[in-house]
Amino acid sequence: MVSHRPISEAQLHTALVNPSPQVAPSAATRSDPVLQAAYDSILEVGVRRTTLADVARRAGVSRMTVYRKYDDLPRLLSALLTVELGAILQEVDEHTTDLTTVRARTAQIVALASAALATHPVLERVLAVDPEALLPLIVDRLGSIQQLALEQLAALIRAGQSPDGDGSIRPGDPRMLALMIMAATQSLVFSSRAIGTADPLKMIYSELHIMTDRYLALEESS
């Protein structure tokens, strides 16, 4: 039997109250003038009043430079959120290296990344002012930010399954297990404003940690 040393409730809650020491925007966003300009514009005026022309002006590049790369504002917003999610995932992954199993690491990464994303300045601004901008990602298609999360989750789950992984995660299609977890986590992230009124201490993410851990656990022998 693979030993499983879970993160303590106190340790997890402390991390969730301040989910990420990362100072937004990420280094990757800061290194790209267009993404930085989009970040600044969304925080200042919201998605609805941000235009590619305005982003180009802020970035000091031509309109065609922005249009050629992103086509429209939804694609630019998706690219920005994907870069920021990548930075969050990289950072929270560094806080799981002391855990003994892939299952423990996966549960902690899911909880911490979800909490950090829900409190990210850009997503908070979009949810507060222009939530309809995210509607296609909820009801129509998986965006690049969701595809990134799905790929990372599936890779983690695969690393925890026998015979090639450490055996801490139950059998099953890694992508389907990842999709189920992502469906649950994105509902929490996109509903964070509503949930926050009933859960000001952010304990829902501790529950997400438990749910993920138990969902991926091996079945106990009878």
Image (cartoon, rainbow, N blue to C red):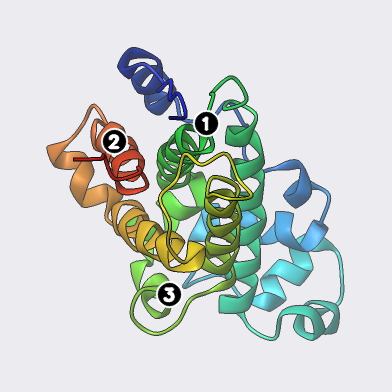
Q: Please name whichever residue, 177 or 202, is drawn nearer the observer in this view of the structure.
A: 177
Estimate the x, y position of residue 165 in percent, counting from the top left: 60, 45
Could you give the CA–CA distance between mark 2 and mark 3, rounded to whole angstroms?
26 Å
Which is more N-terminal, label 3 or label 2? Answer: 3
Q: Mark 1 near mark 3, Cβ–Cβ under 8 Å?
A: no
**In the image, residue 174 above or below residue 70:** above
Q: Amino acid at mark 3?
A: Leu
**In the image, residue 79 above or below residue 123:** below
Q: Quadrant of the N terminus?
A: top left
| Residue 41 seen in this snapshot | no
**In the image, residue 138 above or below residue 163:** below
Estimate the x, y position of residue 4 in percent, counting from the top left: 43, 25
Instruction: Quickly name the residue at label 3.
Output: 137
Could you give the CA–CA distance between mark 1 and mark 3, rounded to whole angstroms?
32 Å
Which is more N-terminal, label 2 or label 1? Answer: 1
Instruction: Quickly name the residue at label 2.
Output: 210
Q: Quadrant of residue 14?
A: top left
Q: Residue at x 46, y 73 (%)?
A: 48
- Which SS class for mark 3? helix
Q: Residue at x 36, y 76 (%)?
A: 135
**In the image, residue 196 above or below residue 54:** above
Q: Amino acid at mark 1?
A: Thr
Q: Please name whichever residue, 214 or 34, is drawn nearer the observer in this view of the structure.
A: 214
Could you give the CA–CA distance between mark 1 and mark 2, rounded to whole angstroms?
15 Å
Instruction: Quickly name the residue at label 1.
Output: 101
Badge 1 local density, few (<14 within 10 Å), some, or many (20+)? many
Q: Is residue 207 left or right of residue 85?
A: left
Q: Residue at x 56, y 68 (%)?
A: 147
